[in-house]
Image (cartoon, rainbow, N blue to C red):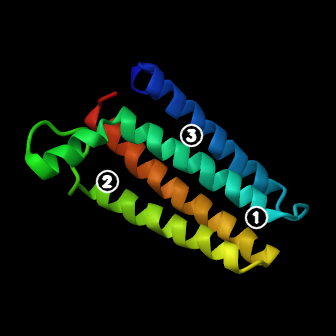
Amino acid sequence: MELYFGSTLSAVSTLLIIAISLYAAFQYNRRKDVSGWGARLLILVASGLLLCIIAAIRDSYVLSVTAAASGGETGLFTVDSIQSISASVAGGLIAIVAGSSLFIRNDKYRRMAFFIVSGIFVFKLILVEASRLLLGVG
């Protein structure tokens, strides 16, 4: 429990993970009755971006970036780690999918984009949080 609620940043990131996961699951359960997927996609992307920022601060990623440039202490994941590279690529994919929905103004496409972004979010979540569990750090 210390790993997920041991500090304010850990607690906030854990609660945000739960909230985003519940939001995506709720939208999935209501997918037949919902219209206006653009707003739902915006909420998902904005809250996911907030979570990524909080998690980067929580895991001291800025130290890793600084260490890559000039040496020194690193954060939880180094810049060239599989976690950092995979999360960066996944974030780029989220930006491409979400950005494309600005130009493709079709609710079916935006619905599909919502679930693609949700899937990428789950991938990033499992990758980073499982790595934190395996490393046993908070």
**Is label 1 or label 3 in front?**
1
**Crowding near the residue tagged with mark 2, few <14, some 14–19, many ≥20 C-alpha atoms within 10 Å:** some
Give the residue pinned by disc 2.
Answer: 83
CB under 8 Å between discs 2 and 1: no
| Residue type pointed to by label 1 | Gly
The CA distance from mark 2 to mark 3 is 17 Å
Q: Residue 100: name its quadrant.
A: bottom right
Give the residue pinned by disc 3.
Answer: 17
Residue 68 x %, y %: 15, 51
| Residue type pointed to by label 2 | Gln
**Which residue is located at x 38 percent, y 60 percent?**
88
CB under 8 Å between discs 1 and 3: no
Location of residue 88 with respect to 53 vertically, above or below: below
**Which residue is located at x 45 percent, y 49 percent?**
126
Give the residue pinned by disc 1.
Answer: 38
| Residue type pointed to by label 3 | Ile
Marks 1 and 3, the one that precedes in the sequence = 3
| Horizontal side, residue 97 vs residue 55: left or right | right
Q: Residue furthest left?
A: 71
| Horizontal side, residue 30 vs residue 86: left or right | right
The CA distance from mark 1 to mark 3 is 21 Å
Residue 103 x %, y %: 68, 79
Element under disc 3: helix
| Horizontal side, residue 107 vs residue 130: left or right | right
Residue 105 x %, y %: 77, 78
